[in-house]
Image (spheres, coloured by chain):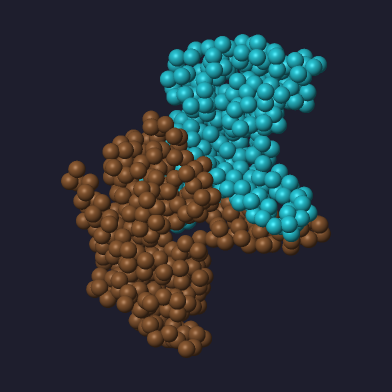
Chain colours: A brown, B cyan
Amino acid sequence: MIRIALDAMGSDNAPFADVEGAVLAAREFDYEIILVGNEGLIKKELEKHKPVPSNISVHHASEVIGMHEQPVLSVRRKKDASIVVLGNLAKEKKADAIVSAGNTGAMVCAATLKCRLLKGIERAGIGIVMPTLKGPMVMIDAGANIDAKSSHLLQYGIMASAYSEYILNKKSPRVGLLNVGEEESKGTGFLKEAYGLLESSGLNFIGNVEGRDFFIGDCDIIVCDGLVGNVALKVTEAVAYAFGEMLKKELKRSLLSAVGAVLAKNAFASMKKKLDYTEYGGAPLLGIDGVCIIGHGSSNSKAIKNAIRVAGEEVVKNVNQHIMESITARKEQ
Amino acid sequence: MIRIALDAMGSDNAPFADVEGAVLAAREFDYEIILVGNEGLIKKELEKHKPVPSNISVHHASEVIGMHEQPVLSVRRKKDASIVVLGNLAKEKKADAIVSAGNTGAMVCAATLKCRLLKGIERAGIGIVMPTLKGPMVMIDAGANIDAKSSHLLQYGIMASAYSEYILNKKSPRVGLLNVGEEESKGTGFLKEAYGLLESSGLNFIGNVEGRDFFIGDCDIIVCDGLVGNVALKVTEAVAYAFGEMLKKELKRSLLSAVGAVLAKNAFASMKKKLDYTEYGGAPLLGIDGVCIIGHGSSNSKAIKNAIRVAGEEVVKNVNQHIMESITARKEQ
């Protein structure tokens, strides 16, 4: 049975949302789920979910890395933090995949340090599965590596292509390079170099794409450095939030609007579901010699459950094996 | 009377939207408006707006730089392009301000080349006035300079502060540095350097901000390099577009939803106005020794009118003088 270790202390609502998500996943999937964190707190939380599925176990970890702690330092100092213990379980092959909705930087650091990188990969990248008008799209890197080289961007393209093909079932996914314009001549020296590498990579490279190509869905993978990707991701969240707030306020302004809002409720609910990140589970940290899924801090139990589902799929579909084959094939060309 | 030269060949709907916007502005404001572009086409367009206000004149320019032409090359080659002629009019002090909704890169290039930079400014930056839940905010740079140094970011902060104070009437505007996290230690070496410069600048620097701070309005100015800014701007446009499309589709799905949508119409209209970029006019190109406003390619006549309004205000309020004083004051410290 596939063993997935989950950071029970990860999300903003830990251990509540994390433990509930684990229970939902344990009931739905044939995975062995190891809850990592404060044993007392976890067991107390599990009490609420009786009967506790037999495929859930607890692995004690005495420390927690907070959302605002410095990643490298905290991973080095807190040797018994849940995130560090996750890394150890993966390293010692006691877990096939690890999942956390905690401090992203610390998880990237612990996973990279403990699992090491796949052969031929220089840096891990966070792939975010985002909704578009035409189905899901992967943006990589969302912030694992903010000082990227052009070769890293090529590797992101290769890794996300394998992920997209085997997890999102897209044949020959279209890869775009995030830039300030479509023309090949656009961008910094770094981006022009990355363009050249991607063009001769054998991937289905469609050239430069722009911020306006997000959500349209004419591209399956958007490759960028972690700084730009992080800003792009957070801006989309900000717009969605602001849009929602404005709409709420406006709809309360008059009785007619309010009545209209009630009638249009189903439409809103259906749209919200389409935009709902929790549906896609967490974000894969691609490039490490292991499977690691990073959830949003605000993950609810459904998001945690879906992150566990995706982690299991990545193991079953052997995405890392496909990445390695893709790297080797390119080297032999 | 303030003289404003407008690129009549600029917008996607040129010369229609541009000429109509000029007519609206000429009727509303005491500016002399010089329409630059193909005289025949402009005059034909003006025919539709009789009586043509006497404060509108036409300055012939035989060439046009298209939206997809390479900026530097096209400015060098097309010496009689409307955008290049705008630059010349500003240089020769025949126009107090220039406005174009055409090729942004070409306008930046022509304006910088012809007007030169203000003393103490190393690079011009495009400031975009964006709506937030609490009023307008300026993001700078939206793409004039994609290979920025940390000193450029400091200068953006200084210029946008003057703009924000004198055009948006904000006392001591709060300046944030766009980064991947709030902590001072975050980001690349380039961003850490910029942080240090902004911190000791005497500006109202509030530290690092993130993509999620867009639209919230707890910050009056967001400073970033042109690559990140360009992506952030275009992503917001993409989300807003996708959100609108999804909502439209969902609302058509059932009779109840559709009825609800009709009732909630006023709410939508009011919200749309709040998010409406055309309300804020175009984007100032800050740092040049002159006044240049760049409009969105999709500008309608209202947006053109507002861009002309803002250009005039920048001249009246003497923003450049305030920028220079701010630079000098900091040097003398």
Q: In screen coordinates, is A90 left or right of B32?
A: left
B23 is higher (above) or lower (below) than B323: above
Q: In screen coordinates, is B169 left or right of A189?
A: right
Question: For the point 28% across and 60% down, which residue is it?
Answer: A320
Residue B135 appears in the picture as rendered = yes
The quarter of the picture where the C terminus of chain A appears is: top left
Residue A7 % position (x, y): 40, 73
B2 vs A100, nearest the viewer: A100
Find the residue positioned furthest to the left: A332
The quarter of the picture where the N terminus of chain A appears is: bottom left
Numbered disc total: 0
Residue A33 % position (x, y): 37, 78
Question: For the point 54% across and 14% down, which residue is it?
Answer: B63
Residue B148 % position (x, y): 42, 36
Residue B139 % position (x, y): 55, 41
| Quarter residue A55 falls in | bottom left
A232 is higher (above) or lower (below) than A4: above
| Quarter residue B138 falls in | top right
Question: For the point 67% across and 28% down, which residue is it?
Answer: B304
A108 vs B41, nearest the viewer: B41
Q: In screen coordinates, is B110 left or right of A223?
A: right
Q: In screen coordinates, is B75 left or right of A155?
A: right
Question: For the point 34% across and 38% down, which residue is it?
Answer: A195
Residue B288 appears in the picture as rendered = no
A166 is higher (above) or lower (below) than A200: below
B29 vs A30, nearest the viewer: A30
